[in-house]
Every structure is written in C-alpha cells, then in structure tokens.
Image: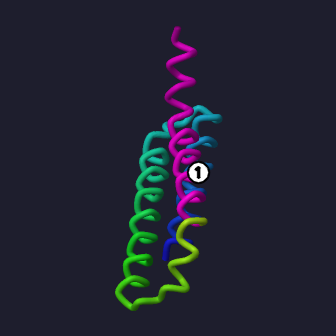
Amino acid sequence: MWLILGLLAIAATFINLFMYAIGKDYKLAMAMGLSLTALTLCAEQSLVSNWIQSEDWSALREVPAMNKAFWFLTIVSILLNIAPILLEMKNKK
C-alpha cells in the first residue's frame, strides 16, 4: 500500500510543478502531494507495526535503511511541493 501511495504522491508532486509551470492553479495538486506523502508514511508505519505484532524480526532489520530513505524522500517531497509558493514569493519582491 505504501508503494502505491508513494507513487501517487510523486505523480501529484509532478502535476503540482507542471500546473505551476503552465500558470494554472496548482494548490490542489500541492495539497494532494503533501497529503499522499503523509498517507505513505502512515502506511509504512502500519506495515512496521504489523511486523512487530507478528514478531517478524528479520523484516524489522530492514527498517533502519527504509527509515533514512523515507526521511530523505519526505523532505524532498515537502520542498518540491512548496517550491511554487516560494517562487511566487520571490517573484513578487
């Protein structure tokens, strides 16, 4: 599930940037990108929780590597999704 939500978050982020580039209202796509990023993280947390409940310790060994990747991708998602707002603020000055 987290993979599907993650891919949808990436798609929404690119739609956000595309809408800004062509001058259309991009705020809905921005909200969708950020929301899907949050849902991706929730789905991943649920997956890890299920591993703990089923005592799948070998699967839990993967968590530290995934943790770093999710931090990085979340920061990139936030920066890409708010880039149009920052660019608008810069252009107004």
- Choose top left, top right, bottom left or bottom right for residue 38: bottom left
Amino acid found under the numbered disc labelled 1: Phe
Identify the magenta region: 66-93
Question: Would residue 11 be found to the left or right of residue 60 on screen?
Answer: right
Which one is in front, 22 or 29? 29
- Choose top left, top right, bottom left or bottom right for residue 83: top right
Where is 23 relative to 43, above or below? above
Residue 76: x percent and y percent? 58, 45
Residue 81: x percent and y percent? 53, 42
**Residue found at x 51% / y 43%:** 78
Where is 43 relative to 31, above or below? below
Residue 67: x percent and y percent? 53, 62
Residue 87: x percent and y percent? 57, 24
Residue at disc 1, secondary structure = helix
Residue 17 is covered by the magenta coloring? no
Residue 83 is covered by the magenta coloring? yes
Query: Which residue position is annotated with label 1?
Result: 72
Where is 29 relative to 51, above or below? above
Which one is in front, 79 or 87? 79
Which one is in front, 62 or 30? 62
Where is 15 relative to 53, above or below? above
